[in-house]
Image (tube, helix red, strand yellow):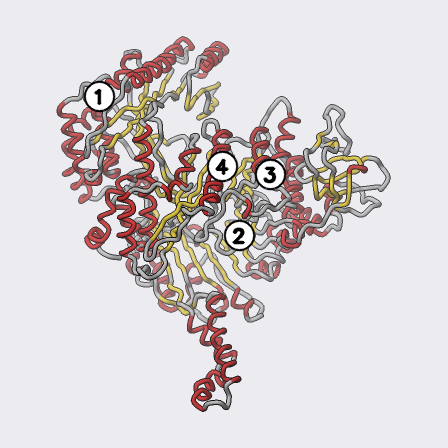
Amino acid sequence: MLPDVTMEQRWGFLSPWCNVLLYRIHYRVLEEDYTDAWRPPSRALQVILPTRTGIYGEYRDEQVFQIEFQNTREALALLAAVAHVDLDAWRYLLSTYCGLDSIGPIESAEEDIPVRFVLLMERLAEVDLVQLCGTTQRRVVSEGYVNCMQRISALSGKLHPDKPGFDVEIPVRVIFNSSSQAPIQILESIQNAEKLIREEWESYNWSLENQPVENGQLRCSFHLEPMIGDFTALGCASDLAETMAQFVGENVWFSQLSLKASMEARPDHKTTLMSFRQMMAVIFDAARRSEELANTRYGTQLETFRTDSPLQLGNVVLECDSTLGPSEFESMFSAIVLTQTTKKLNIKMSPRVKNRTDRRHWWKWLAYGCFSERARTHSALQSLILTDIDDMSVEDMGDLSAVLSSEHPEEMLYGSAHGIKIQQDMMLWKKAPVQWLLTNEGQPRMECPPVKFSGAVPYVRTLSDDGKSDLVNVLIPGFGRCLVNREDLVPGQDQQPNGCSWGLKSLTLQFAEHSPLNCRGGLPHLLSACGSSLLFLTIDGPGGELDVNAILRSCPNLLELCLRKGGVRVLLNFSDFHARKKSVPKLRFKWHDVAGLTTDLSNMRNPFTKCLRRLSIGLINLDSFGSSKRGLNDPTINSYLDALLQMLAVNQTLEYLEVIVPSECPNYRDFFRIHHLRAINRGRKLSMTMKLAFLSIVAAKVQSSTHEHGKAMKRETWSRPTQCYLDSSVISNILGFATSPVFRQHLPQIKSTCKSVMTTEVAYQSEKRWGFLRSWTRALTGQLGNELCRLQSSPFKSKRFYIPAMPFNRSVMTQEGLKLLAAVAYVDHNAWKYLLLNHCGVKLGEPWEEDAEREVVVQFHLTMIKNDWNVQDLVQMCGIQQHDYLSREYSEALARIAANGNEIHSKICGVEIPVPIVVHFINPTGSERNLDDVLWHRDAGEKIQQDWVKRALPHVEAGAFRCTFVFEWAIKANLSRDPIRVDMNMAEKIEELIHTNVWFSVVSLEFNGFRNCEGGVR
């Protein structure tokens, strides 16, 4: 990587464009994205697009918005072009100019930041999405953008003036979060935008505007991929089931879909059950739809699905809660057994299944839906992930094996007799009446009317059919056992051969931690029943012993086996043995002995050493290795680390090693880094394209030698070596030498067990740079809470916290101090944390927590527990008049902060920094009379909004900051501190507040010592 000075000279001309994206992009881990333990979590750059409305809902000037939106779109495109030319420059610009808040730890510096963007849709933005990914990006471009793209193309060594240019495809995905307001409307707007974008491009591609890329130039195009849908907040509601039925039928695609399978407690149980069954039938539909006919498609450069193309719903994450029973298991797995919408299913099992009978039903239906013969021949499912397994008994696995070995598993599941007629798949006529709610004896409930499907239902399997009764027992996908009229059934067509997976290829079993029942001897029985088709198996943390050789006997076709036991995780690869058609020899290794494990890995003739590809050892909890010693100079840890270093010096096949050690042990990082990126005795697999290219040349030379033999001695002498020596063994050796070597990766991790302390140098630099704010931070001492509070929710896996403020203070100095702190956070997040910790007396965490990973958002919560405030106080603080009377000292301090933020000097306009203010109302006496005071919050919000509508602020001057307190409508309320005070009168008062349009973000109540926290209420 080039030095920063050289990077600046080469790419500094893009700094104005990068400043447009300042704090508009963030590097985030997607919450529901499942990755294995050996790869870094899937990340993406989240983009915050400009909006047409201001911080209080007022509409901005349309021309100003369009300019800002176009600048944002073109800045993203230029960054993607840089990534195509120079990945190091792409990383440098993101971290230096774009304010990227988290690129990763030092150890992952070699990891490439993927060039893909995600948009978190929490509002209706159909037009904006079309402008970003539609043809506007080709038709409307600025002169500055064109000039910069030409300069980037000139810096590329791959492009030449006499060669065709290159079209850089930039993948964009939309994240739909169901916790937003009006989620169904937002979901429909995304679907409409996808349709409009496709129609625009179809028309553009057939027009004269569609021209090839100019020679030697780059052209960037945003490409909309299938969205990521998070529906967990909606459960299986009826409106969501209807919307998803429409989407699936219209071939709307998802790259990932998360759903919570639950049965909400409602008076009408039949309605809830019908919604659940409709949702299961839709999500795991038996019809396969083509991606070519969808509005979105995956990009050609996407690496997530490099080896296999996904189906309509991508990866499906199904979160099961404890409200599910046998009826819901029947509904769920009767659809999964035929699914053609997903190849990868992640089921998060509930650790609190009601009773033993329900648990046995769960395992039996799981066996039918995922491992049965019908699933092998009809389902597209290839990968299954089961998490939070807290019980796997021998009895349960006996039931599972019985279902798999039965010739008539459907009849066995219901305990019904075998019928006279053979079971077969039938087609149910459109509008045929279906008795869908049956008694335990299989009879229809008279109080429940039959349901009629709007279309014909395929793959309806008959069971216990006597061949003469008018009503026939059938298994309908998503609805389970039902009764239909015999005359409404017709023979169905067999499913296409390419629609099945012929058994699961990948299985992941993740056991719940600290559960005494998480593996009661049932694991071997499970693998012996369903392991024959598995190619990849992961077993994470079972309580029982792991017998690797028994696993291999049950799963003879395994290519990879990942195991974790205690602090040790291993990845074994058996592809070499299968390639040579040899059986895997018996493996022996010691889980609980690091010294013995390193001895085995030092023996290159040991079969275990040949199979082991990756190893992770955690030395935090030494109890798992038979030692309880810990300390600054712990000889046990030292001996383990020395043994690992000796092993690395000898071992030539281990590709990856991760060692996790406590922070107080000696730092071995430099010793381990010597072995990082060192070539080992293993080559990467050559692609089939390269092999065919080489063999085609060999075949051409041999053929030429045969036809030209005897014509010219010179030609014969040239072709004879090819004909004589390039036999199969020689070609095999040539291909072996052509492979690129594998480089060992080592990832040493230091697990902090003590509070992080800022270094003296950092503290000195922070004090030198920001010490002029001491008078304001001194005024804030005692006005801010003692420690941070965690935010209620976040769509990403990040620790986000806010600053609680103490009782309302009218002091101008205090309010100016809050704004100046927010400005510092905009410029330097580390300095913001330093001032909070060292000047304002705020504690950034407990000693055992990792403070460095905490993201402290700029959000102040005013705690109202006194009666010395009124509506006008809050209006003056958050209304437009907050900018009317600014002290000279405050203006000078804000200008110094802006000057310290060098990243805004090249901006055409200044920066508007919003400072959110959330009111936290506390009712210390628990009296319903005090709840009347909550109404002032609503009145204050209305007055503040009226002030902002009356007049607008001028634009911020170039290179300047302006901080604005933003009033949050939703109040955070702790309505009772005394359990005896919560009675009917208080309940009626709370109901009155809600009906008078008072909004709450969090409501906290106490009832007789039991606490119900963080319930969102409108």
Mark 3 in CB contact with mark 4 (< 8 angstroms)? no
Residue at mark 2: 309
Please give left or right for residue 879 compared with residue 475 in the image. left
Left or right side of 444 for 346: left
Q: Which of marks 3 and 1 is in front?
A: 3
Of residues 484 and 778, the one drawn nearer to the viewer in this rendering: 484
C-alpha gap between disc 4 and disc 1: 40 Å
* Foreground disc of the pair 3, 4: 3
- At label 2, the amino acid type is Ser
Report how far apart the C-alphas of labels 2 and 3 lie in the structure. Answer: 20 Å
Q: Earlier in the sequence, mark 3 or mark 4?
A: 4
Q: In this view, does 571 lie to the left or right of 630?
A: right
Task: Judge by depth and name the residue closer to the eye, 236 or 532.
Answer: 236
Amino acid type indicated by mark 3: Gly
Number of residues whose C-alpha sits closer than 10 Å to that of mark 2, classed few (under 14), some (14–19) or many (20 or more) = few
Inspect the image, locate mark 1, and give the three-letter code of the amino acid beneath it. Answer: His
Image quadrant assignment for residue 617? bottom left
* Mark 4 element type: strand
How dense is the environment of label 1, judged by Cα within 10 Å: few (below 14), some, or many (20 and up)?
some
Per the image, the residue denoted by label 4 is: 230
Query: Which residue lies at the image location 16% right of the left edge and 31% below the top edge?
Result: 895
Secondary structure category for the residue under label 2: loop
Visible residue check, residue 474: yes
Q: Nearer the viewer, mark 2 or mark 4?
A: 2
Mark 2 or mark 3: whose residue is earlier in sequence: 3
Question: Which residue is disc 1 drawn over?
Answer: 883
Q: Are marks 3 and 1 in contact (CB under 8 Å)?
A: no
Disc 3 residue crowd, few under 14, some 14–19, many 20+, Cα 10 Å = few
Q: What element carries label 1?
A: helix
Separation (CA) of disc 3 from disc 1? 54 Å
Point out the frontmost of discs 2 and 3. 3
Q: Distance between the residues labelled 3 and 4?
A: 19 Å
